[in-house]
Structures are given as C-alpha cells and as structure tokens.
Image (cartoon, rainbow, N blue to C red):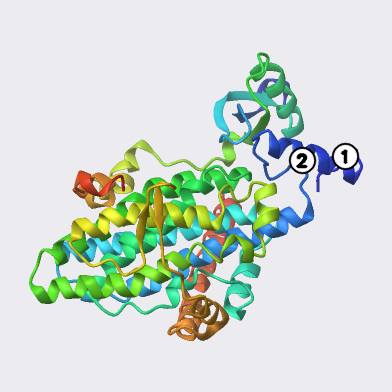
Amino acid sequence: MSLEKLELFEVFLRSKRGLDHRHAGSLHAEDKEQALEYARDVYTRRSEGVSIWVVKSNDICASQEDDSESFFDPSDDKPYRHATYYDIPKEVGAM
Amino acid sequence: MTKYNKSEAELEASFQQRVDSEQKIEPKDWMPEAYRKNLIRQMSQHAHSEIIGMQPEGNWITRAPSLRRKTVLLSKVQDEAGHGLYLYSATETLGIERSELIAALQSGKAKYASIFNYPAQTWGDMGAIGWLVDGAAIVNQVSLQRTSYGPYARGMIRICKEESFHQRQGYVIMMELAKGTPAQKQMAQDSLNRFYWPSLMMFGPHDSESAHSAKSMKWKIKRETNDDLRQKFIDQTVPQIAYLGLEHPDKDLVWNEEKGQHDSGEIDWDEFYAVINGNGHSNRQRIQHHVKAHEEGAWVRDAMSAYQQKKTQRKVNAETAA
C-alpha cells in the first residue's frame, strides 16, 4: 500500500471506566498497531480517554439509509413495547 | 493473552483498590481467577434464567385472550430472548464460550432462577409473572447496574430500561382481572397466592446462609444483600396488592414503625431447596424442552452455514471470472 493510500481506521474512545467506547473519528495508518498509536497522538491529547479501540473502516458493516424502511419501520407500530403505554395508578408507586 | 509485569499480589491489590474506588473492571484488565469464575457463574445463571423464563409465558402465547394481548406477550417473550443474548455475550467477554455455557445449563451443572420451575396455569399467571417475577428481577437488576464488571453493568442498564414494560403490562392484566367478575378476581387472587412466595425466594437464601455473598460483596459483583433487596420488594408490593383489592398472601405481614419497613412471615425454605435441587413441578420439563428446541433448531444452523458457504463460493467464482 502506497503512502498516499493508507488504510482508513475508525477510532473509538472510552472516556471513563464503565462507559461504552464511543466513535471519535477516523485516521489513516499502515496497520492496526500504528493506528492505535496515531489515535493516541491525535484523539487523546487532552485526556479524552482511558481506552482506545481502532477498527478498519472496511470491516464495519453498516445499514444503509435506503434500507431504513425495512430495518426500522416495523417498530413504529408497536407502542406496547414501551413502558409508558401502560397506565399505572399513582397509588401503587413507581413501576 | 495480555501480559502483566507485576506480581500476583500487586495485581490483586490494585484490582481491589480499583473496585473500592468504584471504578469498573473491563474485560482486558487483570482480575483474580475467583472473581472471573464467580462472575461467569452469576452472569450465566442470569442469562439462563432469561432463556428458560421464556417457557412459562411462551406457553400462553397461543391462548392469550385477544390479539392485543397476544402481541404484548409475544413482544415480552422476544425481549427475554434478547436479554439472554446480551447476558451470554457479556459473559463471553470473560473468556468462556457460549457452547460451554449452554452445555452446563443442559447438564444441570448451571442453575437458573428457580421461579421458572413453577407452571403457568392460568391467564392470571401472565399478570402475576410480569408484575411479581419481573418486578423482583428489576429490584435485583437495578442494584446490579452498579456491579463492578463493566460489560455486566452496561447490560443491566439496557435490560432495566426494557423490563419496566414487562412489569407494567403484568400489573395491568392484574388490574383488569381484579375489577372483573368474581371469577376473574378469584383468578387474580389465585395467581398472586401461587407466585408471591416463590417471587420472594428469587432473592436467594438469607444472607447468613448465602454461599457466595461475602466475596461477591467485597468485589462489588453484588451491591446489596439478598435480604435487603427482598425487603425492598416486600415493601413496594404492599400498596400494589392493596390497590388491586386482593388479600395479601402473607398473614404475618405487619408494618414496623420503628424500622420503617414491613415485618414479614418466614419463607418455606424446604420448598426453595427442593425446587433448586431439581424437584420443582417443571424442572425436568424445562430442560427437556430446551434440549429439544436446541436439537430441532439444528437444521436452521445448518442452513445458515450452507448459505454462508454458497455465498463465499459465489464470490470466489465471480472473482476468478473477472
């Protein structure tokens, strides 16, 4: 792979122990070790994280905007999956 | 495998310090072997409970009294399957395979909540299970949102959000039965009577009898003791029973002004241990059904893997042709 065409990696940071890793951005690198070091250098310059994940962008399988109907619409007509669908009298306390 | 440049004692000290200062332990951190084992036991037991817990309610999907109730019940059972998945996956971060966990369930080596060994006999039981069984599970799970193992804590946060619907739909079933005909009200009372005590047993033995409690508390796997959690559940259930106009199954229950909580009657611990040790009404049936479902699903797994092979082959063919 030429220097101009390095592979794209996605960077995820855990800002604090106990929290999920969140997407922070992306960068180019030769391999995953280098990606991890670059991510440290550019994305955690102000103590943004306690842990870093890097993943090749090509390895991410993502749903497409065009598919969103078949992916997500079926839950629109199922309000009964939400707790607020059920009226609970105040007298019985939080539920 | 990650390498650590410290002695075992140093590692253990910094682990405990981390736990003491309310920091989460994450999968790649060093942890004592017994902590890992204890977590695998508790988390897999939790996962198995979600999966086996689908059976008593699944039993009523085809007999739900209306289409709306059928969709609600179906949706709840689907949620339990999802919760099982979250928990199995979180357990796997500890370095154990799903197949090992399932084998332990099917051989009886691993346990699941004994409540699911009680049969669901009437529609009223769908109300009582959602309200009491899921209600007791929520009390425990809310506490576990603060457990020391990161993936478990995060799983609990997600699960708790979804569980609230389960308890509320159950209570609504109870409200409807309780204000229905005398026969319907009797059905609600009967379900309450049968599920109240087993729900209290879900919190496990008394603290003085609990085999895993002390270590689990020190490691903050458990955040509150069995008896404290059970007390919370007893107290919160009292006004809920009163609102339904049903009789409380515990005849010894009295308000203790001094303690600011209810004193209650003793649980039948012989029954608890009998059910845990395999002699509940449905123990054998639950495991047999799990094995059967797993075996009957083999063709689906085979089909998925055949389709995967076909897709890969097509890709290879396309590439060689190009």
User: Which quarter of the figure has residue B309?
Assistant: bottom right
Of mark 1 and mark 2, the one earlier in the sequence is 1
Pick out the residue farthest to the left: B181
* Residue B317 seen in the current view: no
Left or right: B31 with respect to B52? right
Which chain is indicated by disc 1? B
Q: Name the residue rendered at 30%, 56% in the picture.
A: B238
> Which sits in the foreground, B318 or B296?
B296
Q: Which mark is residue B10?
A: 1
Q: Name the residue rendered at 68%, 60% in the picture.
A: B96
Left or right: A18 with respect to B294? right
Local crowd size for mark 1, using a 10 Å CA cut-off: few (<14), some (14–19), many (≥20): few
Residue that label 2 marks: B15
Local crowd size for mark 2, using a 10 Å CA cut-off: few (<14), some (14–19), many (≥20): some
Q: Where is residue A91 shown, x and y percent of the image?
A: 21, 46
Pick out the residue farthest to the top: A46
In space, the residues marked 1 and 2 are separated at their CA atoms by 8 Å
* Residue B220 seen in the current view: yes
Q: Where is residue B165 shown, x and y percent of the image?
A: 30, 52
Amino acid marked by disc 2 = Phe
Q: Is residue B43 above or below residue B293?
A: above
